[in-house]
Image (spheres, helix red, strand yellow):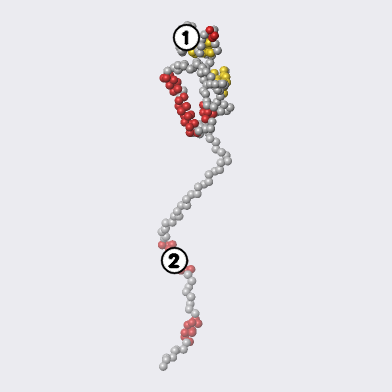
Amino acid sequence: MELALLTQHGLPEGCIISVRAGTVRRQAAAASGRPFRFPKIGMEENPVKIDILKPVATAYLVVKPGETQYKVSFGAGAVSEMDCEVEIKKAEGGTGDAAHGEEANKPAAGSANEAKDYLEAHQILQFIQALLQTVIKERPDQPYIYMARHFMSGYNPTDTRFTGTKPISSSKKEPESELPAETPKDEAEPLPVPAEHPATEIPAARSVPEEEVAKAAASTEEAAPPPADKPKDEAATKEAAPPTADKP
């Protein structure tokens, strides 16, 4: 059985139509134009209840393998005034009916070009691609916690961001001080550098007058001792010596 919305007048924009027939409820956006399907609509399901709902807040839940409990926050900021926790698990006694939810056949919000422009404006694709490449290279034991840390700029939820003065980069030159530099009192005086020894100059020969040369020669002759006389005994000995006889 199907229940279709033929016309609408005065319904608020973005409202949701909720229809309950017996114990089965179906709902969808009023602008979707699709019919509501029920297993049966008859006298037993009377009365059929129709509600007009208006969304207060919307949030999305991304299901992760192996996880059953999630926290959903309604708001774009880091701190939301509305949130809830949900649990996803297999239904007891079977797989259950496949409910036709609001988002089952809802058309995409906006065109593909608008979606592309939005992703490029916020650089989402570049960030996700870089994150996936990092996960593939690092291969962490808990990839979802690893990716969540990168979504938080490397911080854990319990970390406190540094809010003090940023350190000055060593590459930047420090501004020169306008005050005159003071000379330290205890600074030792520099040791004198030994000067090179100049080459010894030989004095030029000066001309000596002839009179001085003559005086110097005379004084030398006067100072020289007289020659020694030969001993007298040697001369007497020669005179007393007999003549040598001739050999036969």
The mark found on residue 91 in the picture is none
Residue 42: % across, % down = 52, 8
Residue marked by disc 2: 217
Name the residue rendered at 53%, 35% in the picture: 181
Q: Residue furthest top?
A: 9
Q: Is residue 233 above or below residue 205?
A: below
> Which is nearer the eye, 158 or 62?
62
Name the residue rendered at 50%, 49% in the picture: 194
Could you say whether the residue bearing mark 1 is in a helix, strand or loop? loop
Q: Nearer the viewer, mark 2 or mark 1?
A: 1
Q: Can residue 174 be seen in the rendering of this structure? A: no
Residue 248: % across, % down = 41, 93
Look at label 2 and name its amino acid. Ala
Residue 222: % across, % down = 47, 68
Q: Earlier in the sequence, mark 2 or mark 1?
A: 1
Q: Is residue 146 above or below residue 43?
A: below
The alpha-carbon separation of the residues under discs 2 and 1 comes to: 156 Å
Quadrant hosting residue 126: top left
Residue 225: % across, % down = 48, 71
Tag 2 near tag 1, CB within 8 Å: no
Name the residue rendered at 42%, 91% in the picture: 246
> Which is nearer the eye, 189 or 242?
189
Residue marked by disc 1: 5
- Sort mark 2 into few (<14), some (14-19) or many (20+) by Cα contacts within 10 Å: few
Quadrant hosting residue 165: top right
> Which is nearer the eye, 36 or 79?
36
